[in-house]
């Protein structure tokens, strides 16, 4: 991590959370399509990089010498998209991700499990309260680098350098511009971007379909669209778009 990324990190140490570890007899196996992701009773799970410390009071299951954290599709849009059949999954041990709209790190914590010690998640978040929790999480998980910044100003965290993928969930009216700006600065040619479009954040007067169509059209100027997944029943009026950066 570079000095200037460290400079934009702010906030106080805060830790919270209780955990429940249940012993079960169910079998578990890694999902082929999703590296380091397990399937337990039709739920996705990741092996905790920080056993004994659940992140969002998620259910945990101890099996095969691992503590598996059940991934909640109602709390994580990435998991919702996986439940709806997401095909492209650019995350594996050692990947480098720029994550815009980190919040308190719910989805990031599962990515942290997947990426392992060689991976890096540059987690950009604008809200100071969320940052406190995110910083606490990053102190327990070395592959999360919290960045307190506005994703509209990528020059503030330019030292992040080139990344393999960008994941964006900022729920802002200009979310397409934010993604394109960040991709220009950080995403490797051919890299994958994932965008969660919330139609209500863009225009409440238009039908979600109309809003989605306009955003996708704008994205197509720079990306090849690979997948479009509606997130119901996990999130209403959300479209999850997966695309490849033409560079
Ligand atoms: N992706 C998170 C997860 O799955 O755990 C949830 C993200 S939440 C829907 C959206 C987050 O984006 C909020 O925490 C909000 O503060 C943040 N956000 C909104 N505008 C932003 C901006 N311009 N720059 C950085 N973060 C922003």
Image: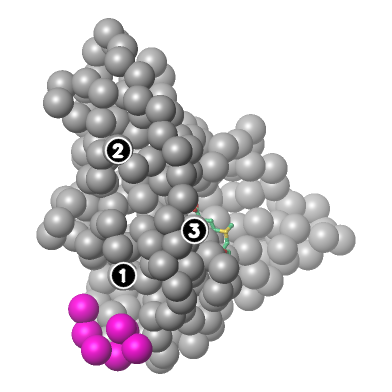
Q: Are marks 3 and 1 in contact (CB under 8 Å)?
A: no
Q: Is mark 3 within 8 Å of ligand 1?
A: yes
Q: Nearer the viewer, residue 44 or 181?
A: 44
Question: Which of the labelled discs sits on residue 233, or is there none?
Answer: none
Helix, strand or loop at label 1? It is strand
- What is the crowding at mark 2: few (fewer than 14 residues within 10 Å), some, or many (at least 20)? few
Query: Could you tell me residue 148's position as x and y percent?
Result: 46, 78
Q: Nearer the viewer, residue 156 or 12?
A: 12
Per the image, is 234 magenta? no
Mark 1 highlights which residue? 145
Q: Earlier in the sequence, mark 1 or mark 2?
A: 2
Q: Magenta stretch: dominant SS?
A: helix
The residue that appears at 40% across and 86% down in the rendered structure is 8
Gap in Å between the C-alphas at discs 1 and 2? 21 Å
| Residue 126 in the figure: left or right of residue 141 | right
The residue that appears at 60% across and 58% down in the rendered structure is 197
The answer to whether any part of residue 27 appears in the image is yes
In the rendered structure, which segment of residues is drawn in magenta? 1-7
Helix, strand or loop at label 2? It is loop
Observer-side mark, 1 or 2, equals: 2
The residue that appears at 43% across and 56% down in the rendered structure is 15
Mark 2 highlights which residue? 52
The residue that appears at 13% across and 59% down in the rendered structure is 118
Gap in Å between the C-alphas at discs 2 and 3? 18 Å
| The quadrant where residue 202 appears | bottom right
Q: How is the image coloured?
A: one colour
Query: Could you tell me residue 144's position as x and y percent?
Result: 30, 63
Question: Which of the labelled discs sits on residue 104, or is there none?
Answer: 3
| Residue 60 in the figure: left or right of residue 169 | left
| Residue 85 in the figure: left or right of residue 120 | right
């Amino acid at each position: 991590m570079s000095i200037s990324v460290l400079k934009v990190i702010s906030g106080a140490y805060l830790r919270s959370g209780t955990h429940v570890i249940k012993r079960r007899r169910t079998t578990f196996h890694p999902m082929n399509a999703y590296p380091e992701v397990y399937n337990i009773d039709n739920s996705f799970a990741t092996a905790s990089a920080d056993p004994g410390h659940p992140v969002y009071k998620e259910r945990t299951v101890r099996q095969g010498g691992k503590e598996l954290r059940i991934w909640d599709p109602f709390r994580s849009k990435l998991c919702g998209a996986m439940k709806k059949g997401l095909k492209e999954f650019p995350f594996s041990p050692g990947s480098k991700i720029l994550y815009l709209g980190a919040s308190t790190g719910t989805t990031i914590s599962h990515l942290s499990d997947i990426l392992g010690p060689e991976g890096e998640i540059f987690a950009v978040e604008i809200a100071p309260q969320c940052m406190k929790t995110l910083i606490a999480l990053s102190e327990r998980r070395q592959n999360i680098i919290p960045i307190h910044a506005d994703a509209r100003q990528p020059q503030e965290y330019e030292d992040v350098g080139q990344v393999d993928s960008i994941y964006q969930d900022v729920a802002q009216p200009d979310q397409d511009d934010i993604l394109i700006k960040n991709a220009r600065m950080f995403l490797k040619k051919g890299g994958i971007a994932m965008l969660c479009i919330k139609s209500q954040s863009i225009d409440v007067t238009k039908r979600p379909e109309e809003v989605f169509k306009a955003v996708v059209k704008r994205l197509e100027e720079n990306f090849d669209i690979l997948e479009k997944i509606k997130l119901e029943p996990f999130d209403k009026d959300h479209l999850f778009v997966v695309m490849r950066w033409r560079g």
